[in-house]
Image (tube, rainbow, N blue to C red):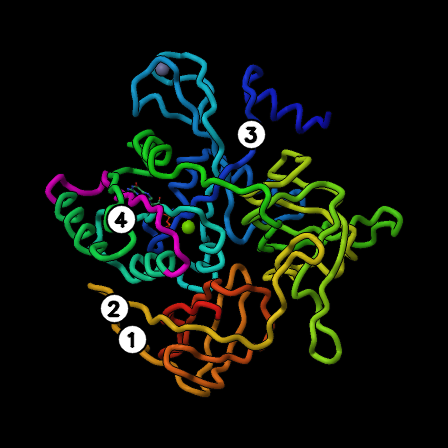
Amino acid sequence: MHFEKLLSVMLMGKSEGKKPVSEMNIGLIGHVDHGKTTLTEALTGKFTDEHSEELKRGISIRLGYADFQIRKCPKCEPPRCYTRFERCFFCGSETELKRVVSIVDCPGHETLMATMLTGASLMDAAILVIAANEPCPQPQTAEHLMAVNVVGIDKIIIVQNKIDLVSEEEAIKNYEQIREFVKGTVAENAPIIPISAQHGANIDVLMEAIEKYFPTPKRDKSKSLLMYVARSFDVNKPGKDIKQVVGGVLGGSIVQGVVKVGDEIEIRPGIEGKDGKYEPLITKVTKIMQGSVELEEGTPGGLVAVSTTLDPSLTKADAMVGNVVGHVNELPETLYEVDMEYHPLPRMKGTKEEFKVEKLKVGDAVLMNVGTARTVGVCTGVKGDVCTFKLKIPICAKEGDKAALSMQINGRWRLIGYGVLK
Ligand code: GDP
Ligand code: MG
Ligand code: ZN
């Protein structure tokens, strides 16, 4: 057994049958400075550690991923029985591992909707972080909620953060603003949990809510493999002896199916040829990692790093982002032109700059996010709600898949709605 594997098993406690493997991805969304990164740390307790661990492996994370364990004290009452620690803070009992989930934080360019949308395509559920000490909604509070709406995420918990900074009266007023704001959206019936991420207050209540409202989605293992590539790497140090060079690494989330060590996989659209057509790549899986745990098979949930026999120059510096991975001949076709049914965004209450693009017309250039793929489509025809787009970079997608659509409005890419592939 690998030392790391052994270590992680030891850290987990011996008698538990469960492997510390993530079962689902939960996104943290909301306006900048409302506390997403602080909450990630409060939940996982090791965000920075894991980050530097990843850096050591040559894998720096642009979309922040951090796994955390939901553990339960067998003696204490809920919600205080919920913890990420191995010992109960209240009674000292050994706690039991319920499951491991991954947090997807969208760091840095929070205002870049495209980054947010890439993250959203990997989320099974979302926590909307709203600061209690500011009027609701702030611009990205609304935009991020619209984005998860568009991608089709309907499992949402709202946290009212920074509760330590407001009086009870202000907290109630803010709560009412939130309730009003989410009316008519996917978050209409979402629970609203007051917390202080910085002081660790009510984190146990949030964990209880995650257990209740975010059950692990049912996964059909017999479905064909589909993985969205969100990162890709060349993990070799420059000047390494050619005989020791290891193959390219693909990082991303598995949306459905299973990938095993030894599998032959196909990557689409692949690489561009001289004629502008893309050639899929076929390669072999040599290793699968999740954090520091080596896996025999990769399943949905968390960020998996799949090592391959690809020439590492193909995967360096995120070059493979936006591709999909499947078993050979099981992926959808590569499309250079698509027909999409256009659904404009509903207008949202309380947003400052209101705009709405009711109809698209020939010549409009639209930024499309499909899974982790990002391309520009130029509208070449409109028939009722259905628009035809010529794509700058092809996508690998099938009928019924959704694309988030953005347009440049006053010099900024703004989400205008979504398209459903015909
Ligand atoms: P993000 O942009 O949404 O990731 O927000 P951050 O997590 O970076 O937090 C922004 C700022 O708010 C930081 O200075 C945090 O220390 C602070 N902050 C976050 N949560 C709380 C909280 O619960 N109470 C207080 N008082 N400050 C907080
Ligand atoms: Mg942040
Ligand atoms: Zn206890």
Name which of mark 3 and mark 2 comes first in the sequence. 3
How far apart, in angstroms, are the residues tagged by discs 3 and 4? 32 Å
Q: Circles 3 and 2: CB distance less than 8 Å?
A: no
Where residue 248 appears, as percent x and y from the top left, is 73, 53
Image position of 265 with respect to 414: above or below:
above
Image position of 83 with respect to 338: above or below:
above
Q: Nearer the viewer, mark 3 or mark 4?
A: 3
Q: Circles 2 and 1: CB distance less than 8 Å?
A: yes
Q: Which residues are magenta?
A: 150-169
Q: Determine the image quadrant of residue 210.
A: top left
Q: Which residue is mark 3?
A: 20
Q: Circles 3 and 1: CB distance less than 8 Å?
A: no
Where residue 4 appears, as percent x and y from the top left, is 67, 29
How far apart, in angstroms, are the residues tagged by discs 2 and 1? 7 Å
Tell me the quadrant of the picture where the N terminus can be found.
top right
How far apart, in angstroms, are the residues tagged by discs 1 and 4? 27 Å
Where residue 369 appears, as percent x and y from the top left, is 49, 65
Name which of mark 3 and mark 1 comes first in the sequence. 3
The amino acid pointed to by label 1 is Lys
Q: Which residue is mark 4?
A: 131
- Front position in the image: 383 or 28: 383
Confirm or reject: label 4 Cβ below 8 Å from ligand 1.
Answer: yes
Q: Which mark is residue 356?
A: 1
Q: Which mark is residue 347?
A: 2
Q: Is residue 264 left or right of residue 346?
A: right
Name which of mark 3 and mark 4 comes first in the sequence. 3
Q: Nearer the viewer, mark 4 or mark 2?
A: 2
How far apart, in angstroms, are the residues tagged by discs 3 and 2? 42 Å
Q: Is residue 77 left or right of residue 37?
A: left
Q: Circles 1 and 4: CB distance less than 8 Å?
A: no
The amino acid pointed to by label 2 is Arg
